[in-house]
């Protein structure tokens, strides 16, 4: 059972029926995907559903989508032709790698407001606008 998602979540999102013989595989992939995701975004290690439910939901959705992508296409076929039986495989999926795009990671990263320490926004000094200066020009 995973930290963010479990077998029931994956079964609920799948458009068919996952055979019971594949339940152990799905649970192992949930743990692998979550482990890889926490390795890429360390702040997820301390995430609890009560603290930030919206972020927890985004992480859960991402984990379920990755597991379903691996379930739907475990061999990593990118292109397939029916006639002469031509198939192109993705090296990363075929090797068992779990990859996340920058866009996917940005949806689950913690957003922090950063203070503008050391930055002063002032306009440059102008003699014609200085107080107490005679303006005859």
Image (cartoon, helix red, strand yellow):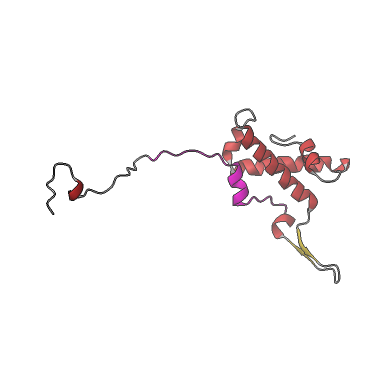
Q: Which image quarter holds the C terminus?
A: bottom left
Q: For the point 74% across and 45% down, which residue is it?
A: 67
Q: For the point 72% across and 46% down, which residue is it?
A: 65
- The part of the image, by quadrant, that contains residue 54 is top right
User: 59 or 128, which is in the foreground?
Assistant: 128
Residue 42's spot in the image, x, y percent? 58, 39
Query: What residue range appears in magenta?
Result: 96-116
User: 64 or 21, which is in the foreground?
Assistant: 64
Q: Is residue 79 left or right of residue 120?
A: right
Q: Which image quarter holds the N terminus?
A: top right
Query: Does the magenta-highlighted stretch encompass residue 20?
Result: no
| Residue situated furthest front in the rendering | 136
Residue 55's spot in the image, x, y percent? 62, 37
Query: Does the magenta-highlighted stretch encompass residue 107?
Result: yes
| Residue situated furthest top in the rendering | 50
Task: Tally the numbered discs.
Answer: 0
Q: Is residue 10 left or right of residue 120?
A: right
Q: Is residue 124 left or right of residue 38?
A: left
Residue 43's spot in the image, x, y percent? 57, 37
User: 44 or 35, which is in the foreground?
Assistant: 44
Q: For the point 64% across and 43% down, which residue is it?
A: 37
**Which SS type dominates the magenta stretch?**
loop
Residue 97's spot in the image, x, y percent? 69, 52
- The part of the image, by quadrant, that contains residue 9 is top right
Q: For the point 77% across and 41% down, which residue is it?
A: 10
């Amino acid at each position: 059972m995973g930290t963010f998602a479990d077998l029931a979540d994956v079964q609920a999102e799948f458009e068919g029926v996952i055979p019971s013989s594949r339940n152990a595989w799905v649970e192992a992939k949930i743990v692998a995907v979550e482990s890889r995701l926490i390795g890429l975004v360390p702040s997820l290690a301390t995430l609890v559903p009560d603290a930030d439910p919206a972020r927890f939901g985004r992480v859960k959705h991402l984990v379920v989508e990755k597991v379903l992508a691996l379930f739907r296409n475990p061999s990593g076929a990118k292109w397939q032709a029916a006639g002469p039986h031509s198939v192109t495989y993705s090296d990363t999926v075929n090797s068992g790698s779990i990859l996340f795009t920058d866009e996917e990671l940005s949806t689950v990263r913690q957003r922090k407001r950063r203070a503008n320490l050391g930055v002063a926004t002032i306009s440059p000094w102008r003699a014609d606008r200085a107080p107490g200066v005679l303006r005859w020009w």
